[in-house]
Image: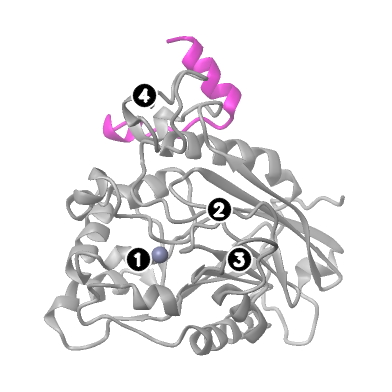
């Protein structure tokens, strides 16, 4: 396995037709850590009163944002010497627990994603359950608290004249909600965009004046635009999903259609159908992954780029249970107004816990 120096100089001016500078250095790899459909499960799922992220092997809850934050920190540390690491969530981050009931005042889910180190998220259908004004309030609350990840929503439109969209427009102006973004990391220029699928759009019960354009048409347009803007790798945060058969491998679903219809997409990180994928689906050469739901798993996809080819090097779904120590400082330090960074490694977290 070849290594990439994460300190590589950023790419400048990728010329059409020429291999990107990053690829001229032969083999590169990058890692995507991902979740989807967390549905406000910030303190785990199960007998929630048992959730004790700071002590190990003594409760039966799964998930929990402190544990996810800790595992993200650990996997980032383990992978970053081999190339850039991206951390993505794929929507339906809110609604489902009492935290979801307060989200419009707190934006807690978005704050937690930001503090856990996520690079971006997208909308799922449930984000609109209480209407666009309430959703805009949640995002604004997270922004006010100083912790909000970019929300990528290429086929979500709020440009109508309806007064209910005014806060949405302000958030878009502040670049908190956008169609797509370029993220340059470790010598690779990533083009990221977010997408609501057809099924997800149909299940959006309270969109108000927000409208959604056709997923495949929009994805094609945005993916091409990202390529034109110099993206080496195009990644879709797709709240579309797959169809799970009663038995046998998954062969159908919107994410697979999307991969086939839009060859400009290199990786589809999916959500919406709550599918625990133990291995990626490769649809016309494009890997499609999804990490279940409720924060019960963290996906880890490693892609190797070699002479213009992108190949899956490995994939793993990490189970989030009480064997994963929680990163209390990610959340608690924020509440206490402590600006120190969270633990960098699991060992650091364990040492801290042992001293308590
Ligand atoms: Zn959904």
Residue corresponding to mark 1: 176
- The answer to which of 216 and 21 lies nearer the viewer is 216
Give the residue number, with chain letter if any, for mark 2: 291
Closer to the N terminus: mark 3 or mark 4?
A: 4
Q: CA distance from mark 3 to mark 2?
A: 17 Å
Q: Give the colour scheme of this rendering.
A: one colour
Callout 3–callout 4 Cβ contact below 8 Å: no
Is 343 magenta? The answer is yes
At numbered mark 1, what does the secondary structure look like: helix, strand or loop? loop
Q: Residue at x 22, y 71 (%)?
A: 132
Relative to 39, does residue 259 appear above or below in the rendering? below
Which residue, given by chain and number where applicable, does mark 3 sit on? 245
Judging from the image, what secondary structure is the residue with disc 3 in? Answer: loop
- Sooner in the amino-acid sequence: mark 3 or mark 2: 3
Residue 50 tag number: 4
In terms of sequence position, does the residue under pointer 2 or pointer 1 come before the other?
A: 1
Magenta-colored span: 333-356
- Secondary element at image label 4: helix
């Amino acid at each position: 396995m070849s290594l990439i120096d994460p300190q590589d100089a950023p790419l400048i001016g990728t010329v059409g037709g020429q291999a990107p500078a990053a690829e001229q250095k032969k083999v590169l790899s990058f890692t995507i850590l991902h979740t989807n459909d967390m549905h406000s499960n910030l303190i785990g799922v199960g007998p929630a009163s048992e959730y004790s992220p700071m002590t190990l092997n003594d409760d039966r809850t799964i998930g929990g944002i402190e544990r996810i934050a800790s595992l993200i920190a650990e996997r980032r540390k383990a992978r970053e010497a081999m190339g850039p690491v991206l951390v993505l969530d794929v929507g339906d981050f809110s609604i489902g627990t009492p935290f979801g009931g307060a989200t419009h005042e707190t934006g807690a889910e978005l704050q937690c994603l930001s503090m856990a180190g996520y690079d971006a998220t997208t909308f799922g259908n449930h984000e609109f359950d209480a209407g666009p004004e309430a959703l805009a309030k949640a995002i604004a609350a997270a922004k006010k608290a100083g912790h909000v990840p970019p929300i990528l929503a290429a086929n979500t439109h709020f440009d109508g004249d309806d007064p209910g969209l005014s806060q949405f427009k302000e958030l878009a102006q502040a670049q908190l909600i956008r169609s797509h973004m370029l993220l340059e990391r470790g010598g690779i220029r990533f083009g990221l965009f977010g997408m609501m699928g057809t099924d997800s759009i149909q299940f959006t019960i309270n969109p108000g004046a927000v409208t959604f354009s056709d997923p495949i048409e929009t994805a094609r347009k945005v993916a091409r635009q990202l390529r034109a803007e110099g993206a080496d790798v195009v990644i879709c945060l797709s709240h579309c999903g797959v169809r799970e058969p009663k038995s046998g491998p998954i062969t159908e679903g919107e994410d697979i259609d999307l991969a086939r219809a839009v060859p400009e997409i290199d990786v589809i990180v999916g959500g919406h159908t709550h599918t625990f994928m133990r291995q990626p689906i490769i649809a016309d050469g494009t890997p499609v992954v999804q990490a279940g739901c409720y924060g019960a798993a963290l996906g880890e996809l490693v892609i190797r780029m070699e002479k213009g080819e992108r190949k899956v090097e490995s994939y793993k779904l990490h189970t989030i249970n009480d064997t994963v120590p929680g990163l209390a400082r990610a959340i608690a330090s924020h509440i206490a107004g402590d600006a120190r960074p969270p633990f960098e490694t699991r060992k650091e977290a364990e040492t801290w816990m042992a001293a308590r």
